[in-house]
Amino acid sequence: MDRIPVRARFAFLALAALGPASLFGQPVKPDADGMFNAGLSHLKEGRPAVALEEFKRAIKVDAKNSLYYKGLSVAYAQLADLCPAGDEGCRQDKLKESIAAARKGLELNPLYVDIHNDLGTALLKLGKRDEGKRELLLAFNDATNPYPEVSSRNLGQASFEEQNYPEAINWFRTSISRNKSYPDAYLGLADSLLATGRPDEALLSLEAGVKELPAHPALLVALGEAYQRAGRLNDARTKLEEASRHDPGGPAGKRALELLKGLPSR
């Protein structure tokens, strides 16, 4: 559902220094937190399959830690996005695993509100839209939610996909009001404004996003496209060149280079 995959946000755990494999002849318990943190690193570096195995190993050591199930849920969700195009069975299986892991995490710790974000997103991707939006609303309305901008942004994305653009605009603006440094909300707001025939407002929203995040490649590309639509070709070229510099070889950088080819020479 996401223009940019939804970001998983975790708190890294502080680890005590590890001793040798045994101490005075006594075996040392496997380090579940170390496995979990290794999984986080693999997720950040784009290896969800490897991350999944680390989270499973951590759960084998400590099956009562809801944080490990959150990691498992996010890894399965990322693997669903990597299923071959057209392989709906693969995608659904991974999403069902993501949902099961999130629900297990909530069973272990009903107060872990951030898992509602993961569960709601997975349900939406599986097509269970009412259930997904309920989970996201639960997260958004909870005063302890550490990332209300994610909940509101995902609610905005759900409304956008349902072509309820006024509601989408409201949710994306809410997301920005909760965290002005969250790029996905600016991108969603611009898309929603464009869908309602308001390109000037979309451009202004992207300018505001780039002001907050001047080196964010996807925002720079979107702003470059907005300038191109407005006929401001020199401004478009400047932003697209910046995007290609900040993301050489990445998806935003490649998109920027494609758009630059379509601009007239200086």
Image (tube, rainbow, N blue to C red):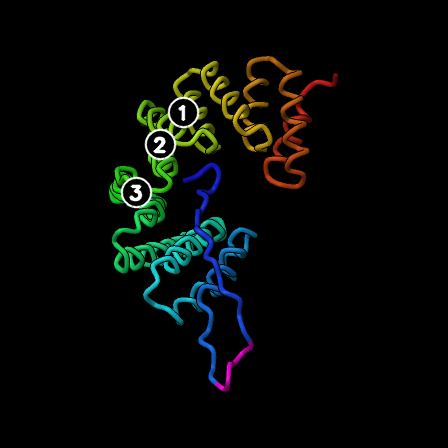
Disc 1: CA contacts within 10 A as few (<14), some (14-19) or many (>=20) = many
Find out whether the residues at labels 2 and 1 contact each other: C-beta distance under 8 Å. yes
In the picture, the quarter occupied by the C terminus is top right
Amino acid type of the residue tagged 3 in the rendering = Thr
Image x and y of residue 69, in percent: 37, 59
Label 2 or label 1, whichever lies nearer to me, is 2
Q: Which residues are magenta?
A: 20-25
Q: Quadrant of residue 258?
A: top right
User: Residue at 54% across / 23% down in the picture?
Assistant: 211
Amino acid type of the residue tagged 1 in the rendering = Ser
Q: Is residue 44 above or below residue 208?
A: below
Name the residue that disc number 2 marks.
Answer: 156
Q: Nearer the viewer, residue 214 or 199?
A: 214
Name the residue that disc number 3 marks.
Answer: 144
Dot 3 or dot 2: first in sequence order is 3
Q: How far apart in space, not on screen, are marks 2 and 1 (Cα)?
A: 9 Å
Q: Nearer the viewer, residue 59 or 228?
A: 59
